[in-house]
Amino acid sequence: MVKKILLVLLFFFLSTTIIYSQCANCGVTNPTGTNYTFLANTNYCFTSNTTFSDVTFGNNVKICIASGVTLTIQNNINYSTANPAVNFEIAGTLTFLQSPQINANLTVNIQNTGVLKVGSSGQNNLTLNGNGTNTLINYGTVQMSVLGFNQSGATNYIDNYGSFIIGQNINISGITTFRNNATITIGQNYNNNSTSTYINCGTINSAIGYNLGGGRVINTGMFNVGSGSIDMSGNSSMENYGTMRSLGTINGSTSANLYNEGVLKITNLQLNGGTLKGPSSASKKGYVYVINKINPNGLRVGPNLDLQKYTSYNPDVKSASQGESAIFNSAPVYVNSSGTAVTQSVANVTYDCATCPSSNTTIAVCPTLYNATFPPVAEDDYYTLPTGTSSTTSILNNDLEQYNGSAATTSNVIITQLSTTNSGVNINTSTGLVNVGTGTAIGIYYITYQICRTSDPSSCDTAIVTVNVTINTNPQTGTICYKNPILTGTILDTNQGISDLGRAADNADNWPMVRKGGWTALEALTKGFVLNRLTNAQIAALQNPVEGMIVYSITDDCIKINTDGSSTGWKCFTVQNCPD
């Protein structure tokens, strides 16, 4: 699949490098003063280094910091109105020397040259206290000690494509989605809540652990958790499609769900009746490495998992002892994809399987930021189609409405043809069928198409259709005519012929009479038959044209046949067919 696409956030990005224009539409450029008030509805641009002591923000303030420029705010942040909207566009460096609590609805876009630093060396805390929507998109560098979200009624979006360094903790309140596409380093803990989701599509390194608090973690990249615990209280859910390693303990309740479709490296697991779940399809396996034995305590395991005993990670060292008794203190409850208790065999739970599918360490798919759902999956297609025909199967037959979701149909996805290398080879976007127009030259052509979820038109994927166009030999629809001869009535000789093979003088060959049913027989092995080659003006000047007369037009580069015996009856014959 083409699989590659980053997703629509506040902007549409095509790579991990983003380029903003320089600061524009500046109402005020390079303001100065010890204490400064940013007036409402004004754009401020900084193109030289500036330091303020205290600042006050009005509503709808935008601050742009050019590349190579540093804006430093030393002390207090004040507001001329409650919960104003404040927007930072950072191509240079923004430094807060204190530990600010920003009581504003904040939008921060950090370019690939930009730096957001809290404390002179990133040692201080940043608290977002806006009660509306707060958005932080980073393509550069972020450094701070603690990142906090204080408002339970706020909606927060954090999307990282650069370097995000948190010296201690991330503390979450409100409805928060935290997505990582590059690298995040957390010095201590990540604390979640029941209305928040953490999506890791890059690499995250957490030194201590995680408290999910009933929230959700989706990992499609590399997720490393240190010696602390991962607490999965309430309805906490962790979904691993990449590689996840926990050096401490994973604790959970009976409602906790730990899904694994990739490689899960566990030191200690105590889910207390929760579920260790694998893929629903038997064509996949989730691989679970365990160092210390698990006390099941009602743990539900399955389906489609393979468990292996290890003695260490990094380096990974597999134990000499394998099997159920090496992993569990007692047998767990084996379940199918519906959660119904079944036998180990039916659950397809294996131990150190030698013939299982290869392990999956990344699916190269990242959920969307704003609803934490996977995009659709468009797979490449290949068709061999004669000219003038359409495919009998849809390009959607091997596509999914979203990863691990239902099959894509014209009801749940929108098809768009993005390009084709031949205008006669196209997709019918209403049906998903591939059409090859009559007269299309034989060859191999490519169509690029996109499918987007009907429920979320910004969530899309692309694929390529390869179409091998061949000659159509169907007498009814084809471009070459193979009409059966008339076999009834009197068989007539062909009485006139021109031969380069010496047959005309050889009565024994009975040539050309042996060639039945023709007006003229022409034959040669090393010579060709050349029609009169005329310009269109010469053809028009022919006197007494006869229906069926044939010439070659060097003006139109085609064979022309007179169809009605008139001077206007000359027609180009460029499409092979079966005329009656």
Image: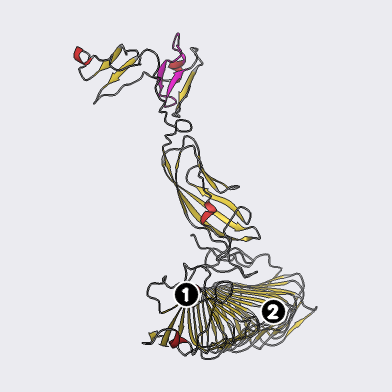
Residue 577: image quadrant is: top left
Please name the residue shown 25% across and 18% down the image: 499
- What's the colour scheme? secondary structure
Please name the residue shown 66% across and 60% down the image: 455
Residue of label 2: 32
Q: Is residue 553 magenta?
A: yes
Image x and y of residue 287, in percent: 46, 77
Question: Which stretch appears magenta?
Answer: 540-562
Disc 2/disc 1 C-alpha distance (Å)? 74 Å
Q: Residues within 10 Å of mark 1 (few under 14, many from 20)?
A: few
Q: Looking at numbered disc 2 in the image, what kind of residue is underneath it?
A: Thr
Please name the residue shown 48% across and 71% down the image: 362
Residue of label 1: 345
- Tag shown at residue 543: none
Image x and y of residue 493, in percent: 32, 13
Q: Please report whichever mark, 2 or 1, sits nearer to the chain's N-terminal start.
A: 2
